[in-house]
Amino acid sequence: MEDPRVFFAAERTLLAWQRTGMVLMAFGFVVERAGLLLKALGQVNPVHDLTLFWLGVIFMLLGVLTIVIAVFQFSRLLPSFSELERPAGYRVGISLGLNLLVATAGLIMLLLLVFLRF
């Protein structure tokens, strides 16, 4: 094909999956914190609090996995692009590295929530 737009379309897809993963992590964090808010207001029993906690953890884990899978898929796709499809001097590793940093930050946040809870 030798069209650089194909490469940039693949990178936009990677970034879309990154945004999806970040939204899942943020939603999980909000769900987990909502349990604490309801607990502080006296509106939830311990079973509901624990359910909201684990539901939030699951959403955060899904967000981390979404980003990691997107990086894996994009890195598998990279060898299929010719030199003409990649712009000269364009650093692909930066977007992959940043995605992995976001996933790592989400995983650290998830582990902190779990360890601070128990």
Image (tube, rainbow, N blue to C red):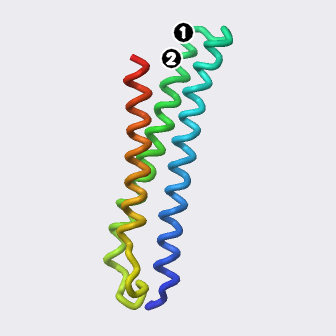
Vertical relation: 62 (above or below) 77: above
Write the residue at 51% across / 62% down. Answer: 15
Q: Which mark is residue 46?
A: 1
Q: How far across and how far down the image is residue 78, in percent?
A: 35, 74
Q: Which mark is residue 50?
A: 2
Spatial CA span between label 2 and label 1:
6 Å
Mark 1 and mark 2 in contact (Cβ < 8 Å)?
A: yes
Q: Quadrant of the N terminus?
A: bottom left
Write the residue at 41% across / 21% down. Answer: 116
Quarter of the image for residue 73 reads bottom left
Vertical relation: 18 (above or below) 108: below
Viewer-side residue, 81 vs 25: 25
Q: Quadrant of the C terminus?
A: top left
Q: How far across and how far down the image is residue 46, in percent?
A: 54, 9
Quarter of the image for residue 92 reads bottom left
Write the residue at 39% across / 40% down. Answer: 107
Write the residue at 31% across / 77% down. Answer: 79
Vertical relation: 105 (above or below) 69: above
Quarter of the image for residue 84 reads bottom left
**What is the three-letter code of the residue carrying label 1?**
Pro
Asked which secondary structure carries label 1, the reply is helix
**What is the three-letter code of the residue carrying label 2?**
Leu
Horizontally, is 111 left or right of 7 in the view? Answer: left
Viewer-side residue, 58 vs 38: 38
